[in-house]
Amino acid sequence: MPGGVDPEVPAQPRRRRFTAEYKLRVLQEADRCKKPGEIGALLRREGLYSSQLALWRRQREHGLRQALRGKKRGRKARALDPRVKKLERENTQLRQRLQQAELLLELQKKASELLGIPLRRLQESESD
């Protein structure tokens, strides 16, 4: 590779993330720019767009320090009602008890087969 530059494009582009401290530093530098073209040079040096600078200025003006940290991307977590959690826990416990009862019934059936005890009465009562 001439010049040590990899010509391959990465398979998945990476989104840049800016810390609040970085944003504030760039805003302070931009505020110090007085001559024409200095802000453009700053943006080119940092690899930023003027729209990013404008957005960060608006956020700073509104005092949204929290907004400078950025927002979490992706789906928002749903807050579950405490009753739902309780019912899910109860459901899990009941499923475990049912599984245990079914295992005990299987054991009783096998024991009755080994002992020669007929199960007709039990089967007839289950169908009622």
Image (cartoon, rainbow, N blue to C red):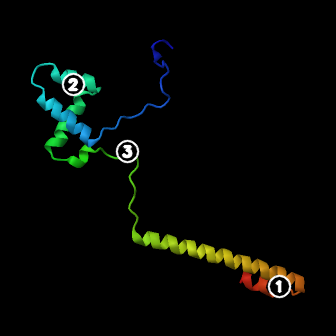
Residue indicated by mark 3: 73
Q: Residues within 10 Å of mark 3 (few under 14, many from 20)?
A: few
Q: Residues within 10 Å of mark 1 (few under 14, many from 20)?
A: few
Q: Amino acid at mark 2?
A: Leu
**Residue at 50% from the left image edge and 70% from the top image edge:** 88
- In this picture, is 31 found above or below 71? above
**Residue at 25% from the left image edge and 42% from the top image edge:** 20
- In this picture, is 98 found above or below 26? below
Residue indicated by mark 2: 42
- In this picture, is 108 found above or below 64? below
Q: Nearer the viewer, mark 1 or mark 2?
A: 2
In this view, the residue in front, 61 or 122, is: 61
Image location of residue 68, percent across then percent down: 24, 43
Image location of residue 84, percent across then percent down: 44, 69
N-terminal of the pair, mark 1 or mark 2, is 2
Q: Residues within 10 Å of mark 2 (few under 14, many from 20)?
A: some
Image location of residue 94, percent across then percent down: 58, 76
Q: CA distance from mark 3 to mark 2?
A: 28 Å
Marks 3 and 2 close (CB-CB < 8 Å) = no
Q: CA distance from mark 3 to mark 1?
A: 61 Å
Place residue 17 in its image quadrant: top left
Q: CA distance from mark 1 to mark 2?
A: 88 Å
Q: Nearer the viewer, mark 3 or mark 1?
A: 3
N-terminal of the pair, mark 3 or mark 1, is 3
Q: Secondary structure at mark 2?
A: helix
N-terminal of the pair, mark 3 or mark 2, is 2
**Residue at 40% from the left image edge and 49% from the top image edge:** 75
Q: Amino acid at mark 1?
A: Leu
Residue indicated by mark 1: 119
